[in-house]
Amino acid sequence: MDFQLREEQQQFADALRRWVAKDYHHEARRQIIHSASGVSDSAWQTLVELGMTALPVPEAQGGFSGGAVDLWVVMQELGRGLVVEPYFATVWGTQFLQLAGNQAALLEQVASGELKLACALGEQQSRHDLYDIRTSAVRDDAGYCLNGAKSVVIHGAQAGALIVSARDAGAPDGICLFVVPATAAGLQRRDYRTIDGQRAATVELCDVRVPASALLAQGSAAADLLEQAADYGVTLLCAEAVGAMDALFAATLDYLKTRKQFGTAIGSFQALQHRMADMYIHLEQARSMAMLAAARQDGGDAAERRRAVSAAKVRIGQAAKFIGQQAVQLHGGMGVTDELPAAHLFKRLTMIDLTLGDVDHHLQRFAAQPAFAEHA
C-alpha cells in the first residue's frame, strides 16, 4: 500500500518523536511507571500543548477534526515511545461522544486537556465479548440507577468521566451506554499497574445515579455505536503496535551491529540476517494492514470496516508475537532485562494483542463475515 503522510501529519509525528527522545526516553518512562500515580502530569500537558487532545475533536468544539488516519500517525509514535499516559483511553472515549452526538461541552473539555476519559466496557465473565453485559441500568423518575462491576478499565482511575455499558433492566436484550462522572456517588475504582507498565482499574458501581442526559444511546443504536467505537479503538491499538514493533526491530538491529562474538559483530552472521529479514517482512505486512484499517474507519461501509479491522488485528497479533520472540532471542539474556527497552516493548505488544479481542477472537469474527463465506 502506498501511504504518504500529509505535511501536517508528518509535523505531528516529528514533534512527538522529538519529545519522546528528549523527555520521555527509557529512563524517564521507568521513573513515571514506578511513581505513585503511574502517569505524568507534565507529559500530559505536553500532549495538550502539541494539540494531541484537540486532534480528534471537531472544530466546532475547539478541535482539529482529525480522522482515523491522523490518529494512526499519533498512536504509532506513542507506541514507538511506549508512552503510558491516558491518551488512548481518552481518544477512544471521545469517539463514543462524537458518535452519540450532543456532547459539545464534554468534547470541549477533552480538546483543552481538562477532561480525561476511560471506557468501562469489559466485565469479569465477558472476555472479548463486549455485548456480554451484567451491569444493570434501572430507569426511575430522576434518571437511571447503575449497578455492576467493570474489569481492566484502561486508565479508569485517571479519568474524569467514564463511558459505561449496561443492560436496561426493563428490556434485558437492550444495551445502554452512559457517560458517568468519576465523582459520582457509589462509583469506586481500584487502580493497579499492568505487566506492560500501563494503568488499569476495576470499577464498581453501587447504586450510582445519573440523570437521563447521561444516556448516550440505547437499544440497537447503542449496539451499533459500541461496535463502531470498538473497531475505532482496535485501529488505534494496531497503530500503536506498529510503532512498538518498529522500535523493537530498530533496537534489535542496532544490537546485532554492536554485539560482538569471536571478534566480529553478530549481525554479520547470515543466519541472523535471515531472521531479521523475516522480522522486517512481518513488520511491513502489519504496517500495511494497520493503514488499511485506519483508512476504512472514515468510510461509510460497515462491512468493509469490520473485515479490515479484524484482519489487521489478526495480522498484527501474529507479527507482534513473531517479532517479539525473535527480538528477545537475538538479544540473548539481555532481551528480558528491565534495563533494555526490548522487554518492555514485547510486554506492551502482548497486552495490545489481548485488548479488544485477541488473534483467535478476530479470526473468528473475520470468518463470520458474509464476504468470507462468499469467497471461501
Image (cartoon, grey):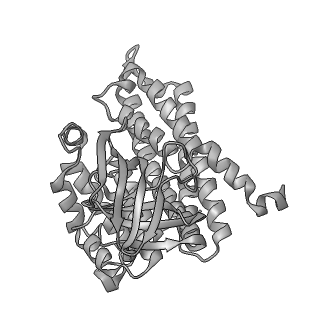
Q: Nearer the viewer, residue 320 or 302?
A: 302
| The residue positioned farthest toward the top in the image shown | 262
Please tell me which residue is depicted at 68% across the width and 53% down the height of the picture. Answer: 365
Question: Residue 97 placed where, x, y %?
Answer: 41, 72
Tell me if 234 is positioned left or right of 211 in this view: right
Which corner quadrant of the image does residue 372 belong to? bottom right
Please tell me which residue is depicted at 53% across the width and 46% down the height of the picture. Answer: 283
Name the quadrant of the C terminus: bottom right
Q: In the image, is residue 232 above or below residue 276?
A: below
Please tell me which residue is depicted at 52% across the width and 41% down the height of the picture. Answer: 320
Which corner quadrant of the image does residue 214 belong to? bottom left
Question: Residue 118 placed where, x, y %?
Answer: 36, 58
Q: Nearer the viewer, residue 268 or 65?
A: 65
Q: In the image, is residue 94 above or below residue 285?
A: below
Please tell me which residue is depicted at 73% across the width and 60% down the height of the picture. Answer: 369
Q: Nearer the viewer, residue 294 or 152?
A: 152
